[in-house]
Image (spheres, rainbow, N blue to C red):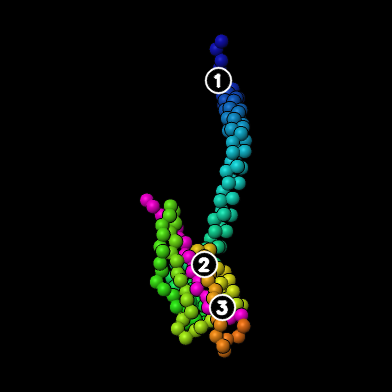
Amino acid sequence: MNIRWDVEKGLLAFMLVLILGMVGVIFWQNSIYDELLGRMPAAERQLAEVGKAYRENHNLSMDLAKDSVAKGANPNTYLFAQMTKSGIGKNSFKMDKPKNASQHSGYEDEEFELKPAVGVKSFSREAIARFLLFVEKDTTRMRVTKLKLTMDQGNATPDDYWQPIITVTDRRATFSE
């Protein structure tokens, strides 16, 4: 069979090859589509996990932004600031150097003992309570762990005045390599 090629037959042959090529591309694209469609549930789970991790990270970042001690403020400075904010007075307590720095797996505790300053005998129960609330209000690192109250029994002292000894513990994470 001897085919004489002319322009029309050449154009038809070219169109046939082009059509077969396009059909092949369509089948190839459908196989890619089916593969991607099969991977969609896993991608949706990953997206949900990313969203959850972002939410947790965002919430922790917001908590850190509110926590002045966790952001690096000196615990002594923080405690003096809370004395001022609570209205008990910045120089109302003397603070001994931190003691009982105990290390545990993953964290370290440091205790600060606050006693009434020289010349300050006692405080009202409301003033002490307000100060204790202010200590724990703006940080998750510092907690009041001990409180000893002795009633002030001086003659000129109003009722319900107390001499507190307060222990505040600063717990910070330790990172081991």
Magenta segment includes 94: no
Q: CA distance from mark 1 to mark 3?
A: 118 Å
Front position in the image: 47 or 62? 62
Q: Position of residue 69 (x, y in %)?
A: 48, 67
- Does 101 sit above or below residue 36? below
Residue 165 magenta:
yes
Q: Is residue 137 above or below residue 108?
A: below
Determine whether, in the image, residue 26 is placed left or right of residue 69.
right
Residue 8: percent from the left, percent from the top? 60, 25
Crowd around label 1: few <14 · some 14–19 · many ≥20 (10 Å)? few
Q: Amino acid at mark 1?
A: Trp
Residue 124 image position (x, y, % from top left):
59, 80
* Residue at numbered disc 2: 146
Q: Which residue is mark 3?
A: 151
**For numbered disc 1, what is the local secondary structure?**
loop
User: What amino acid does circle 2 point to?
Assistant: Lys
In this view, the residue in front, 151 or 69, is 151
Magenta region: which residues? 160-177
Tell me if residue 87 can be seen.
no
Q: Which residue is mark 1?
A: 5
